[in-house]
Every structure is written in structure tokens, then in C-alpha cells.
């Protein structure tokens, strides 16, 4: 099944460029501070992911800056990038980021793990379920479908 990368629309690119400009103007006012790696990549920090800071560039490229060893790697097209884009879209309240996810083919089936929603349920202490991760109440993207909701 084809999962072709999609590019940012002009409106999304403009919105992300404005966010990048705002970060560059006042990096010390963010929780991330001034990251030279972000400047070098033309990206801005959007969230922490274990030992890395996740960076987003206006064209939709997603990078991990490893705070332990100082390395940077791009999350290429695939499950890791799709799951990161879902988390970033929710964190920044920019649903337009979801346009960067592959388009669902007519023949695709709903993911059997997440039931087609793209997120996985986490058991709650009361026996129910909720969606959360360690750092913030953000739904956990489904690793089985890469948060697409379909296979």
C-alpha cells in the first residue's frame, strides 16, 4: 500500500514560518531556550521526546536533537515521523499539520489495534482507559499504523 509523503500547503508553510520567526526572535522565552541546532536546520523546537528535543521545519521536516550526545537526525517518511506529526499537531494546536500525513487509499482498512482513530488507549488505575504520556496529557500515537488509523 502506498504511503506517499505530502508537502505543506502554502498556508501551513506560512503559519510554521511565523512560528519559526517568533522562536528566533525570543528563544530564551521558550521552555527550550536558544538551540544552535534549531538555527542551523531552520527549525524550531516543539516538544521533548525522551532524551531528544523534537524540531520542526516549516516544510514539515521533523528532526530529533539528542541532548545527551548532541547529534541530530531527521525522522524520514514513515511511522516515526507520522507519530511525531500527530503529537506536534496536538501540542501546537495546528491540525493543518495532519495534511502532511499520507492520504488514506480507498482500499485501506481501519487499524485493528487503535480501531481507526490513530491513537492507542492506555489503561487507567480505575480500570478504564485514557490517553496520556509521561510529559503531558497527549494521546499516544498508535505504533501499529503510525497514527494513521489505517493499514
Image (tube, rainbow, N blue to C red):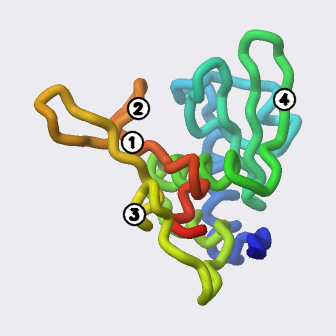
The residue at which mark 4 appears reads as 72
Q: Are marks 3 and 2 in contact (CB under 8 Å)?
A: no
Residue 25 point in image, percent of width and height: 66, 39
* Circles 2 and 1: CB atoms closer than 8 Å: yes
Q: Earlier in the sequence, mark 2 or mark 4?
A: 4
Image point 56% across, 34% down: which residue? Answer: 47
Would you say residue 108 is visible in this rendering? yes
| Label 3 crowd (10 A; few <14 / some 14-19 / many >=20) | some
Where in the figure is residue 79, as x and y percent of width and height? Answer: 68, 51
The residue pinned by badge 1 equals: 138
**Image quarter (top left, top right, bottom left or bottom right) of the N terminus:** bottom right
**Residue occupying the far left of the picture:** 126
Q: Of callouts 3 and 4, which one flags the residue occurring earlier in the amino acid sequence?
A: 4
- For the residues bearing labels 1 and 3, Cβ distance under 8 angstroms: no
Residue in front for this viewpoint, 126 or 91: 126
- Mark 4 to mark 1: distance in Å? 24 Å
Query: Marks 3 and 4, how far apart in space?
Result: 34 Å
- What residue is shown with label 3? 115
Give SS at disc 4.
strand
Using residue 20 as the reference point, say whether residue 98 is left or right of it.
left
In the rendered image, the vertical position of residue 5 relative to residue 120, given as above or below: below
Task: Name the residue nearer the viewer: 124 or 135.
Answer: 124
Instruction: Name the quadrant of the C terminus.
Output: bottom right
Of circles 2 and 4, the one toward us is: 2
Alpha-carbon span between mark 1 and mark 3: 18 Å
As helix, strand or loop, the secondary structure at mark 3 comes to loop
Whether residue 25 is visible here, answered yes or no, is no
**Separation (CA) of disc 2 from disc 1:** 6 Å
Residue identified by numbered label 2? 133
Amino acid at each position: 500500500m502506498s504511503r506517499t509523503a505530502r508537502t505543506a500547503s502554502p498556508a501551513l508553510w506560512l503559519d510554521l514560518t511565523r512560528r519559526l520567526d517568533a522562536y528566533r526572535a525570543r528563544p530564551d522565552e521558550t521552555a527550550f531556550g536558544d538551540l544552535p541546532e534549531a538555527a542551523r536546520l531552520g527549525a524550531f523546537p516543539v516538544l521533548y521526546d525522551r532524551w531528544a528535543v523534537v524540531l520542526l521545519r516549516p516544510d514539515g521536516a521533523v528532526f530529533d536533537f539528542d541532548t545527551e550526545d548532541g547529534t541530530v537526525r531527521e525522522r524520514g517518511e514513515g511511522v516515526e515521523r507520522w507519530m511525531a506529526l500527530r503529537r506536534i499537531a496536538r501540542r501546537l494546536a495546528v491540525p493543518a499539520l495532519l495534511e502532511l500525513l499520507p492520504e488514506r487509499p480507498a482500499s485501506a482498512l481501519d487499524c485493528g489495534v487503535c480501531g481507526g482513530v490513530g491513537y492507542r488507549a492506555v489503561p487507567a488505575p480505575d480500570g478504564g482507559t485514557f490517553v496520556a504520556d509521561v510529559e503531558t496529557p497527549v494521546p499516544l500515537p498508535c505504533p501499529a499504523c503510525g497514527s494513521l488509523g489505517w493499514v
